[in-house]
Image (tube, helix red, strand yellow):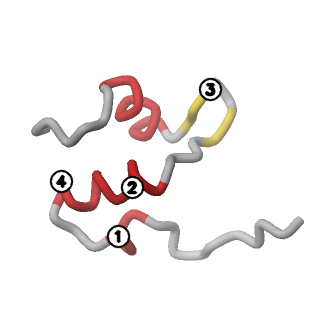
Amino acid sequence: MADVGLSRFTYWKLEREESNPDIPANPRLRSILTLAQALDIKLADLLPMHIPDLRR
């Protein structure tokens, strides 16, 4: 992949969907925007279809 301004470690974490073992990834908005632009896709394509209720 072309250099999109993300470290290899950050990309690796996002690809595996975890930030630490057994802890789901929680990427920064900037990282998600960077990937969407690099892949030339809509931001919505990187977001989950069903957004969980985070008020709990």
Tag 4–tag 1 contact (CB < 8 Å): no
Q: Which residue is mark 4?
A: 38
Q: Residues within 10 Å of mark 4 (few under 14, many from 20)?
A: some
Please indicate whether residue 55 sits to the left or right of residue 22 in the image.
right
Please indicate whether residue 47 sits to the left or right of residue 22 in the image.
left
Q: Quadrant of residue 2?
A: top left
Lower sequence index among marks 1 and 2: 2
Give the spatial CA distance, label 1 vs label 2: 7 Å
Give the spatial CA distance, label 3 vs label 2: 18 Å
Kind of residue indicated by mark 2: Ile
Nearer to us of marks 3 and 4 is 4
Lower sequence index among marks 2 and 4: 2
Where is residue 53 shown, x and y percent of the image? 76, 72
Q: Residues within 10 Å of mark 3 (few under 14, many from 20)?
A: few
Kind of residue indicated by mark 4: Ala
Lower sequence index among marks 3 and 2: 3
Q: Which residue is mark 2?
A: 32
Secondary structure at badge 3 equals strand
Give the spatial CA distance, label 2 vs label 4: 10 Å
Give the spatial CA distance, label 4 vs label 1: 11 Å
Please indicate whether residue 16 sits to the left or right of residue 23 in the image.
left
Residue farthest to the right, as pictured: 56
Kind of residue indicated by mark 1: Leu
Secondary structure at badge 1 equals helix
Q: Which residue is mark 1?
A: 43
Q: Which residue is mark 3?
A: 20
